[in-house]
Amino acid sequence: MSRLLEEYNNQIKHDLKSKLGLKNTFEVPKLKKIILNMGVGEAKDDSKLIDKAIADLSLISGQKAIKTNAKKAISGFKIRSGMPLGVKVTLRNKIMYEFLDRLVNIAIPRIRDFRGLNTKSFDGNGNFSMGIKEHVIFPEINFDKVEKIRGMDITICTSAKNNNEAIELLKSFNMPFKQNKIN
């Protein structure tokens, strides 16, 4: 069992239950999945870039990434329908908790000029999305072998009913959110 999942089951779940005023343990919000997405727009010219992006995202996540294809043809961008333009991976269960642990404790502190995550990045249903400008913040990526630094999107889906529950859940996992300024 991963360290973060064990901590959630033993301590965080009980703390959230009392903090949110929930009656049943099954009402306590939990993580459902984490989705990693990397757009590779230059792949329309060179298809080998998709393979390199798949390799990088697979290293970061610990699970094989898949290609995502264009749904529509856009002549202004010289894109045809079905052309591979990105890669994604969906993490669940043990791998998800291990990735979140690495993200919070290792990768986020390596971001340059980091001031905290924005709490306005929640969608209203308890899901949090964040963007990363450089995928080399993850220690699995060898900086010397990277040809091009890419950005990626990370979406954390929770079973929370609203943003406040999701913020409390992610704060209990030590997610570094910005402090609200009170004037």
Image (cartoon, rainbow, N blue to C red):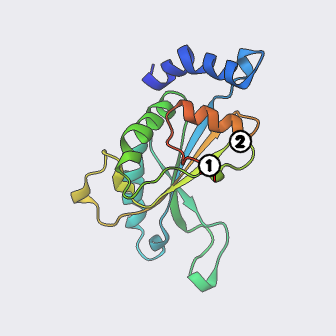
Q: What residue occupies the far front of the structure in this picture?
A: 183
The residue positioned 72% from the left and 25% from the top of the image is: 20
- For label 2, count other residues whose C-alpha is less than 10 Å away and answer few (under 14), some (14-19) or many (20+): many
Label 2 sits on residue: 163
Q: Which mark is residue 119?
A: 1
Q: Give SS at disc 2.
A: helix
- Give how far apart the Cα atoms at labels 2 and 1 are: 9 Å
Place of residue 42 in the rendered image (x, y in percent of width and height, measured from the top left): 45, 73
Quarter of image, res 127? top right
Quadrant in which the N terminus appears:
top left
Q: Which mark is residue 180?
A: none
Instruction: Give the amino acid at mark 2.
Output: Asn
Counting residues from the N terminus, which is met first, the one under dot 2 or under dot 1? 1
The residue positioned 74% from the left and 43% from the top of the image is: 125
Place of residue 172 in the rendered image (x, y in percent of width and height, measured from the top left): 55, 30
Quarter of image, res 34? top right
